[in-house]
Amino acid sequence: MLDPAGKEQKGTLQAENRDTAAASLREGGRTLVSLTEAGALSKNVQIGIFSKKPKARDLAVFCRQFVSIITAGVPVIEALSMLAEQTENKKLAAAADDCRMSLEKGSSLADAMRAHRDVFSDLFITMVAAGEASGSLDVSFSRMATQFEKDAKLRGSVKKASVYPIIVCIVMVVVVAILMVFVIPNFESMFADMDAELPGITKAVIAVSKYVQRRWYVILGVILLLVFAVKYIKKTGAGAHFFGRLGIKAPLFGRLTIKTASARMSRTLATLLAAGIPLMDAIDITSDTMDNIFFREALKKAKDDVAVGTPLSETLERSQQFPPLVYHMLKIGEETGNIDGMLVRLADYYDEEVETATEQLMAALEPMIIILLAAIVGVVVMAVMLPMANMYSALDNL
């Protein structure tokens, strides 16, 4: 199909029949070149299978580009067409193009985005609806860009703190597996030729080595089973509460979890309130952005309390989930009528706190992981060296 400017466009369209699809595609001065029915394996396979849900950074770039285009005087429909062509994330690009077609049929942008909730969150849709209602769509997208940029930075800090120990643990497992499968068996044959009583630690290491060689698939199966079990349990109510509590109470990681939740809550709530969203709706949307169930439940409860006239600062204080600074600053904002301003300051403060906590966590984890790895390797080395030392000692006594 060719757009009014003569530029070629490709994509998929859901319609009741071929004639309806053709009529829809010819709207807006477009020229239909070819139209084929998509099969089960050809409906933009990359969108359904290989493309990933857009990350916060993808949405931030999308919003920044949208603001730049429409502030240059380009209509929203044309802006979406341009973004659909240049957006790298295929799923986001397809959603933008579908929203463009919905707008050409008379739909609002917010309503068009509601058909793609797997791409655009409730926060995004609400902000767009507020921007359309106030006639300041560029301001809404600019605020969303800032929101997504901060969220991407926040998630990056948390990921950095968790990825490092995971990588080191994987390396440790690989090293131990190599020792057990390839190194220990060579020494085992040598020890058998010595015809001497082996130390207990050596017998234990050899026994483990034999089990790993013969039953490696059992160990792999147990590991995979544990991974799937954890993922399944986390989706249940009891599991979500267990892992949520573990995330808050865990040594070293607990402080980072609390500060991350405080930063995200403050930033999201401030963005929504600044756009003119009612407080109760803003709290409800913010609660859905919380990863930890305890913070999510605290905000859901806060919404119910605010509905009956309880100040937000008071209900958050009773929840005992957020740090005292959060509800103290909120209380000042409520008294001065500047809640969103106080929340922005809170968000900036806790963004810095998350970075500091991440650096402290990395500094604490690094020596601990090195010590653990040294201890495991040390056990293997002792298991190998002790029989040899006993042999040399026996030779000296001859």
Image (cartoon, grey):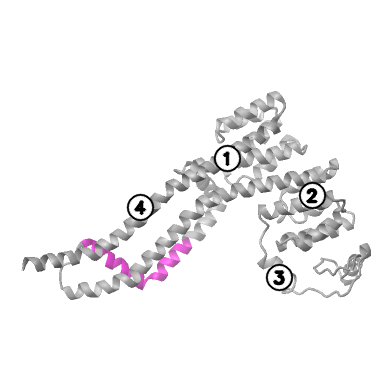
Q: Which residues are magenta?
A: 200-225
Tell me the quadrant of the picture where the N terminus can be found. bottom right
Q: Residue at x 83, y 43 (%)?
A: 136
For label 4, the SS is: helix
Residue 167 is one of the magenta-drawn residues: no
Three-letter amino acid code at the position of disc 3: Val
Indicate the position of residue 197 as horizontal and vertical percent values. 16, 67
Q: What whole-number distance in Å separates the C-alpha atoms at marks 4 and 2? A: 51 Å
* Direction front: furthest residue: 72
Q: Quadrant for the C terminus, please.
A: bottom left
Q: Position of residue 209 (x, y in %)?
A: 31, 68
Q: Residue at x 69, y 55 (%)?
A: 58
Give the labeled residue for mark 3: 45
| Residue type at tag 4 | Ile
Q: Earlier in the sequence, mark 3 or mark 2?
A: 3
Q: Is residue 288 left or right of residue 361?
A: right
Q: Which mark is residue 67?
A: 2
Q: Quadrant of residue 309?
A: top right
* Residue named by callout 1: 352
CA separation in Å, label 4 and label 1: 30 Å
Side (left or right) of 50 relative to 386? right
